[in-house]
């Protein structure tokens, strides 16, 4: 039995038509705000393309941790309210969405690994085809899990629709309600911050780290979500990343995946990426360069001696026609 775990990021919501990028959120902020972070965002928007990374740099220079954290908390509340409004736009019962989305979206996503590799005769990566085939063929039934890094309910709605129609032949979703939100929900414990204290490294924040360093926030919640997510990764034969930038604010999870690949030589990682207009396979060198760039987004966090071996078990997929696919 193969355990296949999907890590899902904001790219899913964007693909489904929600305006959930940081730039979209910033456009909703008031220019007249007295919030020191909002003022900085308005003056230097390009610096804040990734809020969590930029917050760490901003806090590092702060001379008043209390005021900076007040600004951080206000933005967390504003982001929560903004995302709630966006979340309401995604309603599977509405005509706009029901015309585009079928009950097969999750089914096709769960089967995307076979379809992107084994069943795709045009896939140039025969090594990926072979390795994935070897993992799946010796296991009679696969188990699928989701670790959701989004606050919205889009994935939950898709999964619930899938469950309404699943039967004994359907791929089986298992785990924590099948949709495990690692960073909290729009109604409870939103986690917004950096990956490590060193990302701020400001002694004035000594009493604030537990509220703006994500791993410490999650640990203090003491609700078992970190341990459960780590166990899912540890038990995975195939890990799939979709809709995530693989940025430094979630370095804890990239380190976890890399350690898993280091010590589990039969495990592989699939990274999905999207390029507007697609990438032509007629220029192999260009395609290989892009694939290596995608691999290096996670390999940059690896400091061991097995980078070359791990790299051989990381397979980028560009513009998949199967994962979370719906009619345009």
Image (spheres, rainbow, N blue to C red):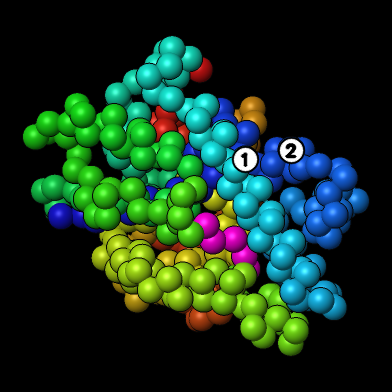
* Image: magenta residue range: 190-194
State yes or no: residue 298 in magenta.
Answer: no
Q: Which residue is mark 2?
A: 28
Instruction: Please report the residue visible at 83 percent of the width from the left and 49 percent of the height from the top.
Output: 33
Q: Residue 232: in sight, yes or no?
A: yes
Question: Which picture quadrant has residue 182?
Answer: bottom left
Whether 50 is drawn above or below 222: the answer is: above
Q: Residue 116: in sight, yes or no?
A: no
Q: Quadrant of the N terminus?
A: bottom left
Instruction: Please report the residue visible at 75 percent of the width from the left and 84 percent of the height from the top.
Output: 204
SS state under label 2? loop
- Nearest the viewer among 16 and 189 is 189
Q: Which residue is mark 1?
A: 82
Crowding near the residue tagged with mark 1, few <14, some 14–19, many ≥20 C-alpha atoms within 10 Å: some
Mark closer to the chain start, 2 or 1? 2
The image position of residue 25, as x and y in percent, is 69, 41
How would you classify the magenta stretch by its main secondary structure?
A: loop
Whole-angstrom CA distance, mark 2 to mark 1, is 8 Å
The image position of residue 303, as x and y in percent, is 56, 79
The image position of residue 161, as x and y in percent, is 29, 29
Whether 146 is drawn above or below 37: the answer is: above
Question: Contact, CB < 8 Å: mark 2 with mark 1?
Answer: yes
Instruction: Please report the residue visible at 62 percent of the width from the left and 40 percent of the height from the top.
Output: 82
- Nearest the viewer among 25 and 66 is 66
SS state under label 1? helix
- Nearest the viewer among 221 and 180 is 221
Q: How many marks?
A: 2
Whether 320 is drawn above or below 188: the answer is: above
Crowding near the residue tagged with mark 2, few <14, some 14–19, many ≥20 C-alpha atoms within 10 Å: few
Instruction: Please report the residue visible at 19 percent of the width from the left and 27 percent of the height from the top.
Output: 165
């Amino acid at each position: 039995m193969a355990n296949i775990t999907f890590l899902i990021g904001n790219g899913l919501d964007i693909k489904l038509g929600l305006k959930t990028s940081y730039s979209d959120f910033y456009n909703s902020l008031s220019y007249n705000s007295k919030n020191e972070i909002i003022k900085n965002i308005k003056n230097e928007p390009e610096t804040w393309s990734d809020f969590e990374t930029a917050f760490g740099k901003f806090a590092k220079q702060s001379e008043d941790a209390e005021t900076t954290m007040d600004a951080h908390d206000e933005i967390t509340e504003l982001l929560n309210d903004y995302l709630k409004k966006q979340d309401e736009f995604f309603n599977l019962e509405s005509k706009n969405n029901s015309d585009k989305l079928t009950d097969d979206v999750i089914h096709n996503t769960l089967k995307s690994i076979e379809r992107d590799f084994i069943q795709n005769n045009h896939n140039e990566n025969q090594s990926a085809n072979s390795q994935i085939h070897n993992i799946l063929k010796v296991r009679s039934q696969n188990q699928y899990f989701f670790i959701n890094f989004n606050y919205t309910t889009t994935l939950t709605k898709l999964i619930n629709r899938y469950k309404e129609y699943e039967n004994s032949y359907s791929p089986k979703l298992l785990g924590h309600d099948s949709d495990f939100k690692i960073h909290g929900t729009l109604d409870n414990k939103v986690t917004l911050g950096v990956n490590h204290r060193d990302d701020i490294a400001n002694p004035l924040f000594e009493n604030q780290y537990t509220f703006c360093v994500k791993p410490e926030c999650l640990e203090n919640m003491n609700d078992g979500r970190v341990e459960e997510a780590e166990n899912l990764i540890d038990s995975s034969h195939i890990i799939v990343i979709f809709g995530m930038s693989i940025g430094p604010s979630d370095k804890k999870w990239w380190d976890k995946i890399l350690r898993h690949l280091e010590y589990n030589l039969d495990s592989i990682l699939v990274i999905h990426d999207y390029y507007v207009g697609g990438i032509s396979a007629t220029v192999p060198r260009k395609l290989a360069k892009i694939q290596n760039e995608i691999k290096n987004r996670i390999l940059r966090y690896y400091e061991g001696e097995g980078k070359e071996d791990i790299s051989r078990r990381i397979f980028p997929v560009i513009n998949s026609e199967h994962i979370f696919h719906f009619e345009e």
